Amino acid sequence: MSAIGEKRLQDHLDRESLFDLVRRERFARDQRRFDVMAACFRRDAYIRTSWYDGTGGDAYVAASRKWMSNTGNSKHWVFPAFAQIRGDRATVESPAKIFNRAKLDGVEIDFEVFCRFFSRAVREDGDWKLASFHVLFERDVMAPVFAGDSLPVDRALLDSMRPSYKFLTYIQRSRGIAVNQELLGDDRPDELAAFHAGEERWLAGEN
């Protein structure tokens, strides 16, 4: 095989390994396989979601275990789509959906968050590990499980929330949880562009 062919093969294998890593981490989380989830992260990984902002893969897994025991079990669909690889560094961006069934003022509702998951990854001893995890919000929806029920929301309050994750913010507020309104989302394209520019610099080894 030529050198070009070998590089293409290695790039393909790396990309598939990265995509498998991203899928495996979310699947393990949803199925409460916390040992598998923990093995996906570097010990110094940085994680930022709607409810967590901190450093340390083990700490995030422990917090996820506690979070899931208190707030129910949301699920995730993730579709890895775009990987960039520079030696032993990589980034992966994946269209995703977060969905959950809950009760709001006694009405059973479903809500879904359309987003993208973005991670840095680093190769360690031949294996890829997640070095970061960010949620990039697009939009969300909420609907009563039974079509005849009215959706019990305060429209004025709802309209005051970030459009890229307003229903998520609303439902968490009903649980006594304040969602950070400064997260990355498509409704703030300049902030999102700056984030991606910084990730490109990291990928190039500039920081």
Image: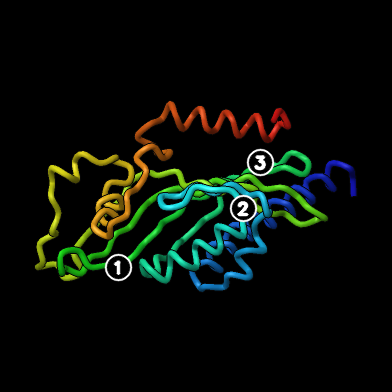
Q: Is residue 99 above or below residue 135?
A: below
Q: Which residue is mark 3?
A: 84
Q: Which residue is mark 2?
A: 56
Residue 154 placement, left or right of 31 = left
The picture places residue 75, in percent across and down from the top left corner, at 42, 65
Structural crowding at the residue carrying mark 1, measured as other residues with C-alpha within 10 Å and reported as few (<14), some (14–19) or many (≥20) = some
Which residue appears at 47% of the width and 47% of the height?
Answer: 135
The picture places residue 3, in percent across and down from the top left corner, at 89, 42
Q: Looking at numbered disc 1 in the image, what kind of residue is underneath it?
A: Arg
Q: Is residue 153 above or below residue 26?
A: above
Which residue appears at 63% of the width and 63% of the height?
Answer: 38
Which residue appears at 18% of the width and 64% of the height?
Answer: 144
Q: Of label 3 and label 2, which has the lower sequence position?
A: 2
Using the image as rendered, state which of residue 47 and residue 190 is in the foreground. 47
Are the two marked residues, 3 and 2, in contact with CB atoms closer than 8 angstroms? no
The quadrant of the image that shows the C terminus is top right
Q: Which residue is mark 1?
A: 101
